Amino acid sequence: MEKDLEIELDEPTLFGHPKGLFYLFFAEMWERFSFYGMRALLTLYMVDVIFEALTDRDYATAAVYASYGSLVYASTVIGGRISDKILGMRNSIFLGGILMSLGHFVLAVENNVAFFIALSFIIVGNGFFKPNISTFVGTLYPDGDPRKDSGFTIFYMGINIGGWIAPLLCGWLAVTYGWHYGFALAGFGMLSGLIFFWTGIRNGVFGDRGMPPANGSIDTKVLGVKNRYLIPILSFLTVPFIAYLLAAYKPLGSEGDFFGDQNMVNIIFKIIGVSILGYLAYIIVQSSPDERKKLIVAVLITVFMTIFWGFHELSGSVITLFAARNVDLGGIMTASQTNSLNSMWIIILAIPISMLWTRLSKKNLNPRTPYKFGMGLLFAGISFYILSISQGSADENGMVPFAYLLLMYFLISVGELFMSPVGLSKITDLSPKRIVAFMMGVWFLSSAFAFQVVGFIGKQLSIESTDKNIGGFETLSIYTDGFLLIAQYSVGAGLLVLIAGPFINKLMGDVH
């Protein structure tokens, strides 16, 4: 072990870390630039262009946005497994990057069919790219390397830099020159990320990491075609099917029948959810008493994280529309550019909050995971309460000061830093080794299910009108009433976690 660590440390370094980290840093920064740049424009583009003529354009937008977000995160489970078993991380990252680039550039085509095709390319591409580049960072460090945690901190800073800059630049282009210039810039961002990754490979900074599995399955033939060619072919063939699912955003039936207000993606995710819960119940029953306790906590953590992300991800949909219709941005930024505020606060707050936990640990006062989760949900609830009371400061046109939105993003970013960094590590600590991969898949799927929450809320707060001058106190009242309900649910969930904290701590045992 010590000998292996010494060999690894002999590799070329930069600022004390493997050089490969910084190639991955810029690759991920540009990939997130493309993703968040496009996301900042997506809801407004659907409302103002794709569904402009519909009387229920907000409803349609909410349905498509939810389906897109759910499928984006669900695809990572499939892409990750294909990488592990067949392609390897390098091939998966390249395939995913190419597909995502195509998606962003197709978005620059002004056509409704092209719109759904573009989103489908991004969904499939993200499935290959996202889970593998994060895993790649871990391979740069041997087990026990004390630099690993700080390396991931540097890497995640790249994510937030991309998430901060992208909405500002893509939003400015969209307003100044047109939507499709903003989407095209996102595409160039994705290509830039691929170029950085390819340069790292060419310079040999990754060594032999990320290659296909040694079992040779990448060259195994299926129907006479090698897997290295078959998987890209199938990926492209999957795109029209996913586009069809996205376009089928209308409910399958009328209100009150068997389906109710459900589209095809809703039904698919309900089936997946019930299946996963059933399998988890089976695993828990079959586990030893100690494993059973920890698995119950893992499931609870995942559920509460799903609730948090369900409210957090409203930033790209309902909150963007609220910013466009009822926030006096005062020329500071456009509604799409407000999507940069979350990443801005994360960049500002990440190091201070990390130092806070370190300082509290030295005094033996660092809160255990349940209390951090409870406080995170409380911060999220308070952030929406801030938006709900903004109505009292509205002007004669129903526009509220920008300061409310700025404060809201500050508070929800604090909540995110209380929950997100610890959640993933706790899932691995609480899960028995024989099912840790499955539990990681469940954790990633929680983000997919969070978008079902986003879609539900978006539909409830939809404003059915084709009037481009929509706004005023009627719209403000709809939004602020909705934000108050969200605040109450989030605060209630947070208080429930805090009250149950001692019991959850007992179940966790020695896992901190």
Image (cartoon, rainbow, N blue to C red):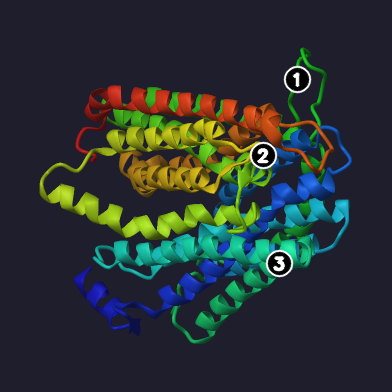
- The tag earlier along the polypeptide, 2 or 3, is 2
- The tag earlier along the polypeptide, 1 or 3, is 3
Confirm or deny contact between disc 2 and disc 3 (CB under 8 A).
Answer: no
> Most extreme residue toward the bottom, as rendered?
203
Classify 299 as above or below 29. above
Where does residue 98 sit, x and y in percent of width and height? Answer: 69, 68
- The tag earlier along the polypeptide, 1 or 2, is 2
Asked if residue 326 lies left or right of residue 246, the reply is left
Separation of marks 2 and 3 at Cα, in angstroms:
25 Å
Q: Is residue 226 visible?
A: no
Of the pair 117 and 403, the residue shown nearer to us: 403
> Most extreme residue toward the front, as rendered?
396
Where does residue 242 sit, x and y in percent of width and height? Answer: 76, 46
Residue type (three-letter) at the residue carrying disc 1: Phe
Residue type (three-letter) at the residue carrying disc 2: Ala
**Quarter of the image with the C terminus in it:** top left
Report crowding for label 3: few under 14, some 14 to 19, many 20 or more residues within 10 A (C-alpha).
Answer: some
Q: Which residue is mark 2?
A: 66
Q: Nearer the viewer, mark 2 or mark 3?
A: 3
Q: Which residue is mark 1?
A: 259
Choose top left, top right, bottom left or bottom right for residue 509: top left
Asked if residue 442 lies left or right of residue 54, the reply is left
Separation of marks 1 and 2 at Cα, in angstroms:
17 Å
Secondary element type, mark 1: loop
**Quarter of the image with the N terminus in it:** bottom left
Where does residue 20 sit, x and y in percent of width and height? Answer: 43, 77
For image coordinates 29% across by 52% down, the residue present is 353
